[in-house]
Image (cartoon, rainbow, N blue to C red):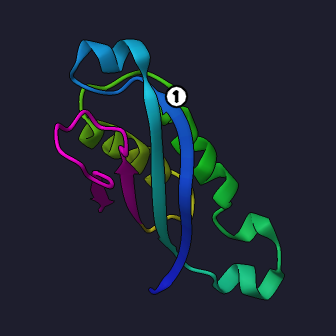
Amino acid sequence: MSDKITLTGVSGFGFHGVFDSEKRDGQIFLVDIEATTDFTAAVNSDDVSDTVNYAVLAEIAHAAITGEPFNLIEKLADQIARDCFAVPGVKKIKVTVHKPQAPIEVPFGNVAVTRELP
């Protein structure tokens, strides 16, 4: 199956990190999601109820970003992946969490982790 829904740049302010300053001050996180599904029913019906609603995936990612803080973005990516994978019609999920303001001592553009299920 090669049908995919791709959602990039879901953003939110969260308090994830191992340092006290990250948990106190927070920062912006960005999430990209790639959901593998089957478009056959949706193509035939032209009805959103026959596909994976990408707005639902965006809401899941945003709720996780702004919700319970985790020490690691690996854990955040896993939580989002598991919640998205539970959406009916999702056959495979790939979630990338970006932490562009990570407390790294050298100049950098972005740091990200990716989690895939199954």
Q: Amino acid at mark 1?
A: Thr
Tell me which residue sits at (21%, 23%) in the image: 18
Residue 47 in picture, x, y percent from top left: 82, 72
Disc 1 is placed on an element classified as helix
Image position of 118 (left or right of 40): left
Tell me which residue sits at (32%, 55%) in the image: 109
Tell me which residue sits at (48%, 36%) in the image: 28
Image position of 2 (left or right of 94): right
- Does residue 47 lie above or below 16 as drawn? below
Image position of 98 (left or right of 13): left
For the record, the magenta segment spans 93-118
Q: Quadrant of residue 22?
A: top left
For the residue pair 78 and 105, the one nearer the viewer reads as 105
Q: Quadrant of residue 77?
A: top left
Tell me which residue sits at (56%, 50%) in the image: 10
Q: Which quarter shows the N terminus?
A: bottom left
Q: Which residue is mark 1?
A: 66
- Does residue 79 lie above or below 112 as drawn? above
Kindly give the residue lying farthest to the right in the view shown: 46
- Does residue 113 lie above or below 8 as drawn? above
Residue 73 in picture, x, y percent from top left: 29, 39
Kindly give the residue lying farthest to the front in the view shown: 107
- Residue 84 among those drawn in magenta: no
Q: Which quarter shows the C terminus?
A: bottom left
Residue 89 in picture, x, y percent from top left: 56, 65
Dot 1: few (<14), some (14–19), or many (≥20) neighbours within 10 Å?
some
Q: Quadrant of residue 50?
A: bottom right
Image position of 25 (left or right of 39): left
Residue 45 in picture, x, y percent from top left: 82, 81
